[in-house]
Amino acid sequence: SWKSAERGFAQSEMAVNIGGVRLVLDGDVLNRYPESRLAELINCSTLNYDVIYSLCDDYDPGKKEFYFDRDPDAFRCIIDVYYFGEIHIKRGICPICFIKEMEFWKIQQSYLDECCKSYLTEKQEELAEIANKVKLILGDLDEDPSVNCSARCLKFIWKLMEKPESSLPARVIAIASFLFVLVSSVVMCVGTIPEVQVEDEEGDLVEHPMLEAIETACIGWFTVEYLLRFVSCPNKRHFFLSFMNIIDFMAIIPFYLVLTLTYLGTAMMDLAKVQQAVQALRIMRIARIFKLARHSSGLQTFTYALKRSFKELGLLLMYMGIGIFVFSALGYTIEQSHPENLFSSIPQSFWWAIITMTTVGYGDIYPKTTLGKCNAAISFLCGVIAIALPIHPIINNFINFYNKQKVLETAAKHELELMVLQSSEDSLMKATRKCGAACALESSMRTSRSDNCIPLLEESTRTLKSKDYCSETESF
């Protein structure tokens, strides 16, 4: 057997068995990358089995075949580097597991094609997001006994106001906040109806006192909610710079500015200017409708989809801008010959081009000549086409982002379930050591372990915090 092994190593070809798939590889091709595992194996001049088994899982001297307990599909992709100098990840192969396969075969990641590198980067970012979600959940469940009572109270308030999924009272507060936003928005609209308004001492129409009381109650809720979230926030700087917190502040501050101007403004400026300032601040109350985005995952997804569609929206604005300029100039020039011309200037014609290309058509400005009507028809068709073209990419961005968020949430829950399973298995293993061999056999038949789990968190974090999660799993 040793002589046959010597002849096997001396040959220029090498037979390998990758997960049950047998391949015969040329030694000259493998030597193109001498630092790879296969090149080291074919160039191995010693017959020390410790060296051989350090490079492969098993070796059959009779068949002159090296065995590797690895993924054959991933190996078919990796072997391309010896022939073509680059590697492509085929569809259906996990890129993270594929990188582990490349590390085993000692192939550098620089040989990956650019398209596969971007795909790998995207998957790594997704795994990082999953890990962050898991860390946030475990961070909420982790109770450090060394933390003082005030810090625990602040953390409890933060979870109560910011994380509706953490407990039943948090869900109740989130629903109440949502209802207060709706009520305040309805009150703001109803207060402008003349039949609902009442006259003051000077005969001017003002909001009904009942509506003002409801408005004050809503603002009180928003103020308490904002202050509690600010006091309990672990990062005050991030709190102030958050877009949603800026919206919350803009929804609250007009009420207090109106009160200040109403009671103190008359001493500093004329009554007419005070009323104008109050009216302008009342308009700012429309910002509170954006508070609904805090409680609606659909609105948040739509916002993120628009952020990712800036390129498509920019193209739409560019097409519309060019069309508005061209057709308004043509419309102004053509209509100059008509005695009842409605196009007084090109800038004034911009309004006609905008309402025509966006298919609104108010009818306040319209062409009267035949050529002007033909120009209007062409501008209408161009506007429809310009608006329709970027719609499909924007919808795709929305669907892709929405599906991605769903997948990430499912993956995070799956990772937590694996932590629970691992913790329960560890508990069973400890119990089997006490109850003997019979109990060990019974428990081993009831448990199972996944070999393909990709650890997202540090092992110490998983083992320390999974116990806390096991005790509170029913709350999710």
Image: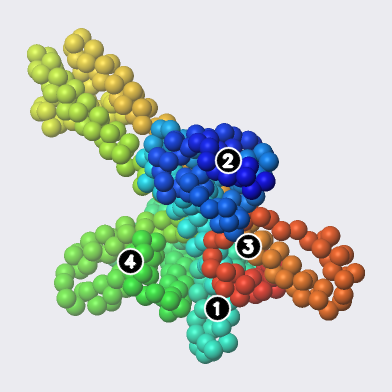
**Residue at mark 4:** 241
Q: x%, y% of residue 97?
A: 54, 49
User: The residue tagged with tag 4: helix, strand or loop?
Assistant: helix
Q: Nearer the viewer, residue 124 or 129?
A: 124
**Residue at mark 2:** 7
Q: Which amino acid type is shown beneath numbered disc 4?
A: Leu
Residue in the picture at 65% in, 44% down: 61
Is 8 displayed left or right of 218 in the figure? right
Q: Is residue 74 above or below residue 408?
A: above
Q: Nearer the viewer, residue 435 or 386?
A: 435
- What is the number of callouts on the image? 4
Q: Residues within 10 Å of mark 2 (few under 14, many from 20)?
A: few
Mark drawn on residue 311: none
**Residue at mark 3:** 416
How far, Cα to Cα, is label 3 from label 1?
22 Å
Q: Residues within 10 Å of mark 1 (few under 14, many from 20)?
A: some
Residue in the picture at 32% in, 42% down: 310
